[in-house]
Image (tube, helix red, strand yellow):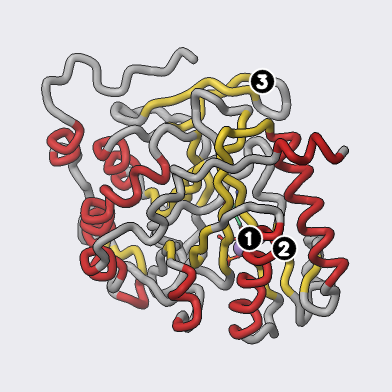
Amino acid sequence: APARAASEGRAMNATEAADDIAITHPERVVFPEDGIRKQDIADYYRAMARWLLPEIAGRPLSIVRCPQGAGRPCFFQKHHGAGMRHVDSVRLREESGEQEDYLVVRDEAALMELVQFNALEFHPWGAKADAPELADRLVFDLDPGPDVPWKEVVAAARTVRARLAELHLESWLRTSGGKGLHVVVPLRPACPWEQAKAFAHGFADALAASEPLKFLATASKRLRKGRIFVDYLRNGRGATSVASFSLRARPGAPVAMPLRWEELGRLKSAAQFTLRNAPARMRRLRAHPWEGIDKVKQDLSWLDARS
Ligand code: ATP
Ligand code: MN
Ligand code: MN
């Protein structure tokens, strides 16, 4: 795909280039209740770049920009914009049939350029920019109704993991930084979106059918009361999920944090990790909590054999 050259003719490497991205209005308050300013956001993303970049690099990316801070209206942006010198792009077909340039971050300079443009959240596709029609990650986004106790959200994630394991699919866990948990399934080799979507939908339907008091597979907020929506809709072409290590534009500056399954029992909420404590956690850990995820070979080809 014809991608725009991000930093033509530069002798600097991307980290040096990131040093050069000027953060304007560093004193601007982003999280008013937490006293967190734009410079704190930039410091967070500089410190976490080595963890965040592998999650987003080379994927079509949506960002949530909050020019007036997290407490004010923010907006989703998926298209490349004027003035972006380090951010790459990939030309993709829209649902409407039009071609558009989607954002692609490839290095730290591009990440910091988006931070300078007041990006707070990063939401990649489950596909690479050079293979946009093939899903390489599925996300089961567990969305609890407002009155669901945390213990049940934890149990639900374990149930999803066990059901996937019955299908010989290994899965990984993260907090959303909001109210729920995400269970992530890598696919290697990657598979067409149509198949990924059909599988995810079928999986959610089967779960809701077998435990109807706990799960539902329809997006209706009204029906969600007391139950957990198994949001399979993240698994279509063009859909996104929040990246591990992304901040969220919600009170407390929470972070979407990947976990080892063994950590789930001790987890208190989906917003437990924040801008304040996430960098220290990652410094303390010797290995990525999802170590091995990119080595696993599993796919959905067995579905063909059944149908
Ligand atoms: P929570 O745990 O609170 O549900 P979440 O990140 O899972 O947090 P959802 O509302 O369930 O939030 O949304 C799931 C994903 O859908 C988001 O992470 C995001 O990538 C995508 N999404 C949500 N809103 C939009 C939007 N307006 N435009 C595009 N994508 C969106
Ligand atoms: Mn969710
Ligand atoms: Mn959802």
Pick whichever of labels 1 and 2 is earlier in the sequence: 1
Residue 128 located left or right of residue 237 = left
Residue pointed to by mark 2: 230
Circles 1 and 2: CB atoms closer than 8 Å: yes
Q: Quadrant of residue 32?
A: bottom left
Kindly identify the amino acid type of the residue bearing the numbered disc 2.
Val
Image location of residue 110, percent across then percent down: 30, 36
Kindly identify the amino acid type of the residue bearing the numbered disc 1.
Asp
Residue pointed to by mark 1: 141
Residue 246 visible in rendering:
no
Real-space CA distance between mark 3 and mark 2, rounded to the nearest whole angstrom: 31 Å
Seen at 37% across and 35% down, the residue is: 105
Image: 264 above or below 162: below
Real-space CA distance between mark 3 and mark 1, rounded to the nearest whole angstrom: 29 Å
Residue pointed to by mark 3: 98
Residue 277 visible in rendering:
yes
Q: Secondary structure at mark 2?
A: strand
Q: Secondary structure at mark 1?
A: strand
Mark 1 lies within 8 Å of ligand 2 (Cβ measured): yes
Kindly identify the amino acid type of the residue bearing the numbered disc 3.
Glu
Crowd rating for badge 1 (residues with CA inside 10 Å; few <14, some 14–19, many 20+)? many
Image location of residue 177, percent across then percent down: 48, 67
